[in-house]
């Protein structure tokens, strides 16, 4: 019987429990660099949370920074 994605994630997390929590903070770049004129730039980000939920977002901008 195939596992659902939620069951798979739960089983994976249970199998990979560690006694030491590790936190890593990633600093964003100091400034945004625009794409060439006439092009668009897509920035994306995603995160996983302790309650097993996930979130994502994206922003598309032109060379002037307009969303």
Image (tube, rainbow, N blue to C red):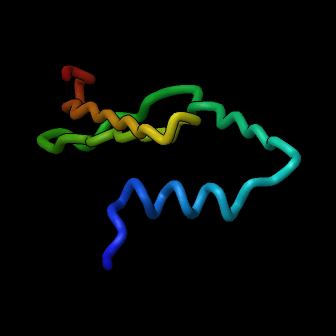
Please give the name of the residue rendered at 44% of the width and 30% of the height, measured from the top-left corner. Answer: 32
In the displayed image of the protein, which residue is found farthest to the front? 1
Q: Is residue 31 left or right of residue 66?
A: right
Q: Quadrant of residue 12?
A: bottom right
Q: Is residue 3 left or right of residue 59?
A: right
Please give the name of the residue rendered at 22% of the width and 30% of the height, measured from the top-left corner. Answer: 61
Image quarter in which the C terminus is found: top left
Image quarter in which the N terminus is found: bottom left
Please give the name of the residue rendered at 26% of the width and 41% of the height, measured from the top-left corner. Answer: 41
In the displayed image of the protein, which residue is found farthest to the bottom? 1
Query: x and y percent of residue 34 in the render?
Result: 33, 34
Query: x and y percent of residue 15 in the render?
Result: 67, 64
Q: Is residue 7 above or below residue 37?
A: below
Q: Is residue 8 above or below residue 51?
A: below
Query: x and y percent of residue 2 in the render?
Result: 32, 75
Q: Is residue 18 left or right of residue 4?
A: right
Q: Is residue 17 left or right of residue 62?
A: right
């Amino acid at each position: 019987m195939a596992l659902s994605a939620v069951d798979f994630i739960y089983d994976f997390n249970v199998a990979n429990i560690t006694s030491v929590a590790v936190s890593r903070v990633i600093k964003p770049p100091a400034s945004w660099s625009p794409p060439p004129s006439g092009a668009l730039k897509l920035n994306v980000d995603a995160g996983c949370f302790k309650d097993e939920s996930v979130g994502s977002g994206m922003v598309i901008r032109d060379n002037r920074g307009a969303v």
